[in-house]
Image (tube, helix red, strand yellow):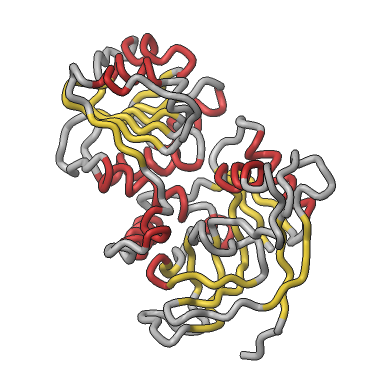
Amino acid sequence: MSLPSTMQAIGFTHSLPIEEPNSLIQFETSLPKPGSKDLLVKVAANSINPADAKLRVRTAAEKPHDEPKVIGFDAVGEVVGLGDDVDGFSVGDRVYYAGDITRAGSNAEYQTVDYRIVSNAPLSLSDAEAAVLPLGALTAWEALFDRLRIQPDEKKSLLVIGGAGGVGSITIQLAKQLTNLTVIGTASRPETIEWVKDMGADHVVNHRDLVNSVREQGIEHVDYIFNVADTKGHWESMVELIAPQGMISSIVEFEGGIDLSALQGKSVGFIWELMFTRSLFGTHDIQKQQDILFQVANLVDAGRIQSTLTKTLEGFDVETFKEAHRLIESGASIGKVAIKF
């Protein structure tokens, strides 16, 4: 296969509001060369996540980047190159992955990615449908089984705060398909309530009055809480609702402190989940992400879980990516947004 020497990418040098002309810029750059454990992927579609918007507005707030920073952490594409130490992949494979926060992202025509965090994409999904799954599915799976350490046969309860978003949507599905948990998801608008029900939640509660809403369902305490919306804002409610000897996990960082000692009386644990930890630190079990994505693809192809795609944008250009960032930053999106190149 003949490959170009350069490619188009979309990035940023300054942290600016998305409406500013140079909040995102398109530029030409050299085609990346795969390292020994890398795949070179021709990206067909990707998805925009809250992490993209956070990095855009924070990483160059005090000092501009010397070179445009390319973000993007979900992708589907075709393998067009292989490093010497890659195992299990061939040129032509259709793959999906969430990438590595320390490397150039998928807002580019081509991307290199460590094969150990990549899997073959679900056969039954389009590129856009598959592109929205990796980051959310990895986050949800790791939170449920690596952080909260839920056992599949436990007949306990799980509260997902932020049930209608990308991570919440796939968390509810995985919990219902792979565990015996009673799953409670939060939502407040008619359309988000319906979406959370469609994802399989046993109960839907209102995050604006969380404690009362949960207890109106006849549920006094929950054994597990996974917060994908607002850790600090929901802290007091989580302290009240968590069962003695329960566990709380969150993906949402915050400024200032929380009263962690409020959990002491109940002997409750709190643990962070960051999907990028394994690739960031090159952990000994980094390849578990490949295995998770493989199992998620099998669940999709077996019809047990569905894509969380709700909107597809088309075109590799700055305005398309800006529109995706606007949707993410609105705080009112349901499911996930994909961009088809």
Judge left or right: residue 237 versus residue 20.
Answer: left
The residue that appears at 69% across and 63% down in the rendered structure is 341
Residue 314 picture location, percent across and down: 72, 56
From this view, report whether residue 275 is shown above or below residue 87.
above
Judge left or right: residue 92 versus residue 226.
Answer: right
Quarter of the rendering containing residue 202: top left
Q: Answer whether residue 62 is visible to the viewer in this image.
A: yes
Residue 98 picture location, percent across and down: 48, 58
Residue 266 picture location, percent across and down: 18, 19
From this view, report whether residue 218 is shown above or below residue 32.
above
Closest to the observer: 111 or 212?
111
Closest to the observer: 149 or 264?
264
Q: Answer whether residue 182 is visible to the viewer in this image.
A: no
The residue that appears at 40% across and 46% down in the rendered structure is 274
Judge left or right: residue 256 versus residue 330.
Answer: left
From this view, report whether residue 90 is shown above or below residue 141.
below
The residue that appears at 32% across and 48% down in the rendered structure is 142
Judge left or right: residue 30 versus residue 300.
Answer: right
The residue that appears at 29% across and 45% down in the rendered structure is 177
